[in-house]
Amino acid sequence: MSRFRERWTIAALFGALLLAAVDAQMLIPLLGRLEADYGTSVEGMGRLFSAYALAAGGFNLVVGPLTDRWGRLPFLRAGLAVFALLSLATHFTQGFLQLLWLRAGTGAASGLISTCTAGLVGDIFPYRRRGRVMGIVLSAYFVALIVGVPAGTWIADRWQWRSVFLASCLLATVVLASLWGPLADVRSGARAGGRIQLAYRRFLTVRPLRNALLVSFAVAGGTMALMVYLSGYLIDRFGVTPIQISWLFVVAGVAAVTGSLISGWVVDRWTKRKVFLWANLAFILTISGLMSIPWGAGLIGLFFAVSLCVSFRQTALQTLQTQLVGIDARGSYLALRNCFSQLGIAMVVLVSGWCYSWSGYGAVVFLVGLLSAAAGILFFLSVREPRGSAR
């Protein structure tokens, strides 16, 4: 493929994932405003994240195998179109229940966008250099911290929090238009496909495939829980403002974007498996110090290190998972992976809310560390580097 087409494709996929990432994170600094508007506690607002995650995971279980049969690009375009419409509807929402249902619907569209984006990276780029492309595309998650979270806070301060969703609608329209540009050739698997139940049964009974899914459950859930309740902890303990918190996310985002871009090269040279294991260990060690450092440069520096670890382990894990099955079943497996990730987010965020109410942010950090340690042991014992590097 030409360099121009390759770069356009990477940019379009990056934009699609950036949209999904911003949407998943932008409510974090706005929780205080939503509490005031709807009279709901922090723990109650956690239901927005749980509903979003459950809808994303459940919807993808059905649609994921269909992307293997009819191609991922049409479903990515459809997901962006639905996302734009639901974001526009959210701009006009009235009442917490309406917001909850609209966020669940947007979560389903966002999950489809994430699954198709990762699948297309696997379809288009060979495994031997897929880590570099995956690192660039996945850096969208962390660019969202730099751009999305502060921009959402600024828009809400200048106008109101509903205006954030109008901006999301406009961004989705732009990204959707880019997917009719000069994209690289997209290969697809066996069009005939198989029965959905048989495909998922295989993924859940083959030990390495099943355990890689469980690792995604723990990693995604732990990472989101650490972020969701960080704002409440900083406000309660140190009295910091939402604007100060947004700048912490900017610093974390800079670290994670840097880590994503570097990690792509590292995982291609060193193996994805080794990078994940070392990054996961470093993550556990760094979060163990979060509760012992006061607000200031030290805490910001530590969170910088945490973000680096998150980006390295995410690039390594997702790149490896795109090669665990063939192209004819990649969409199905990544959909199930996304389901496990979203289920992990829903359950861990919910349990972490109880932990936060019971014993504060320290209990959340302990739970996240425990889950990460379990994920590392499971990954070490059962998941191996895929053989072959052609596709």
Image (tube, helix red, strand yellow):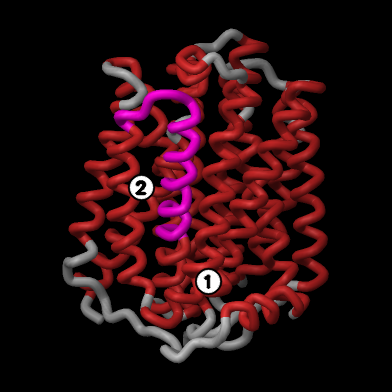
**Residue drawn where x is 81% and y is 44% of the image:** 370
| Nearer the observer, 260 or 343 | 343
Give the amino acid at mark 2. Leu
Question: Label 1 crowding class (10 Å Cα cut-off): few <14, some 14-19, many 20+?
Answer: some
User: Which region of the structure is painted magenta?
Assistant: 91-114
Q: Residues at badges 1 and 2 in contact (C-beta under 8 Å)?
A: no
**Residue drawn where x is 70% and y is 57% of the image:** 278
| Nearer the observer, 378 or 255 | 378
Give the amino acid at mark 1. Asp
Q: In the figure, is residue 127 to the left or right of 216? A: left
> Which image quadrant is residue 324 in?
bottom right
Res. 19 mark: 2
* N-term mark: 1 or 2: 2
The x, y position of residue 172, in whole percent, is 27, 48
At mark 1, the secondary structure is helix
Q: Is residue 151 visible?
A: yes
> Which image quadrant is residue 46 in?
top right
At mark 2, the secondary structure is helix
Residue 83 sits inside the magenta stretch? no
Q: Is residue 257 visible?
A: no
Question: Label 2 crowding class (10 Å Cα cut-off): few <14, some 14-19, many 20+?
Answer: many
Res. 74 mark: none
**Residue drawn where x is 31% and y is 62% of the image:** 78
> Which image quadrant is residue 250 in?
top left
Does residue 301 sit above or below 295 in this rendering? below
Does residue 104 sit above or below 181 in this rendering? above
Tally the marks.
Answer: 2
The x, y position of residue 173, in whole percent, is 22, 50
Identify residue for label 1.
268
